[in-house]
Image: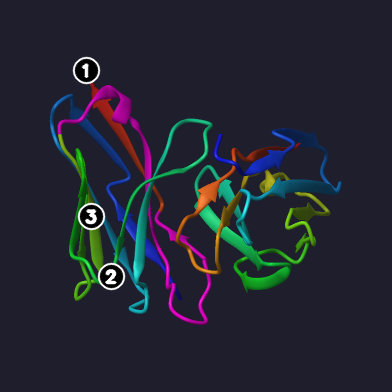
């Protein structure tokens, strides 16, 4: 069935360092890959997304890369700050004609940025 | 404020009981989604409604049911509650049938005692 594997489950970095979170998806028809940030007790918030016709997308300190052949996508955060500390979730969806808005989520990565 | 409104924010109830969670989507959005977030399970898709009709179903238990009303708000009904049903239940909405433009509500924390 559809599955998204996310690694690592926890990640601790020093302020200013980079953080990388990796996800692998099983459904080759997936074509939309959003990343969400969830602070404790709060709702997941979209931070960046990428569609399958693009290999890389960047938004200030955040970037996402996609390798369709390997069915693998990654989140890169540069110059990390303490406020980046949160749980990050990757997700995958097939948004093609006749398909739905169902998102399959990874298990989450708890990122801790130490001052 | 995301524009997606969920009530109540917290709910404590006993095993065997039935509860109803309510969600109002962001203005203009036609799809409503329900997700369950348990401590060790991440975000699990339950069900999607689009413009009043069921569009997709995930691993939703038979004890759970949902509907979307003509004004597009949605309700998730959980019955014969068990301790393991304790979780955060999130509603999300999007403009169309696909996953673009997803916005989550603040969630309902359900505690079954």
Q: Tell which circle, 3 or 2, labels the residue nearer the N-terminal end.
A: 2
Q: Quote the CA–CA distance across marks 2 and 1.
A: 36 Å
Residue denoted by label 3: A74
Question: In the shown orientation, is residue B62 left or right of residue A11?
Answer: right
Which label's residue is closer to the chain start, 3 or 1? Answer: 3
For this orientation, the residue located farthest to the top is A115
Looking at the rendering, the stretch of residues picked out in magenta corresponds to A79-106
Nearest to viewer (mark 2 / mark 1): 2
- Residue drawn at x 50%, y 68% is B98
- Give how far apart the Cα atoms at labels 3 and 1 are: 24 Å
Disc 2: which residue: A52
Which comes before the other along the chain, label 2 or label 1? 2
Residue B37 horizontal/vertical position (percent): 56, 47
Residue A83 vertical position relative to residue A108 in the rendered view, above or below? above
For mark 2, give the secondary structure: loop
Q: Which mark is residue A94?
A: none
Given residues A36 and B28, the one toward you in this image is B28
**Whole-number angstrom distance, CA of label 3 to CA of label 2:** 13 Å
- A89 inside magenta stretch: yes
Label 3 element class: strand
State left or right for residue B55 relative to residue A1: right
């Amino acid at each position: 069935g559809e599955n998204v594997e996310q690694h690592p489950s926890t990640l601790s970095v020093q302020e200013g360092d980079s953080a990388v979170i990796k996800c692998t998806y099983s459904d080759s028809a997936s074509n939309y890959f959003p990343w969400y940030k969830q602070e404790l007790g709060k709702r997941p918030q979209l931070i960046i997304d990428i569609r399958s016709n693009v290999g890389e997308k960047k938004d200030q300190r955040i970037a996402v890369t996609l390798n369709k052949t390997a069915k693998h996508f990654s989140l890169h955060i540069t110059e990390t700050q303490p406020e980046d500390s949160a749980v990050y979730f990757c997700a995958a969806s097939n948004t093609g004609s006749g398909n739905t808005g169902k998102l399959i989520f990874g298990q989450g990565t708890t990122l801790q940025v130490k001052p | 404020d995301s524009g997606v409104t969920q009530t109540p924010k917290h709910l404590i109830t006993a095993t065997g009981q039935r509860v109803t969670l309510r969600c109002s989507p962001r203005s203009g959005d036609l799809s409503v989604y329900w997700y369950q977030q348990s401590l060790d399970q991440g975000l699990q898709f339950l069900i999607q409604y689009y413009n009043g009709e069921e569009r997709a179903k995930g691993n939703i238990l038979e004890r759970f049911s949902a509907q979307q009303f003509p004004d597009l708000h949605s309700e998730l009904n959980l019955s014969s509650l068990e301790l393991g049903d304790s979780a955060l239940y999130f509603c999300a909405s999007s403009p169309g049938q696909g996953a673009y433009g997803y916005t989550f509500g603040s969630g309902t924390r359900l505690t079954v005692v």
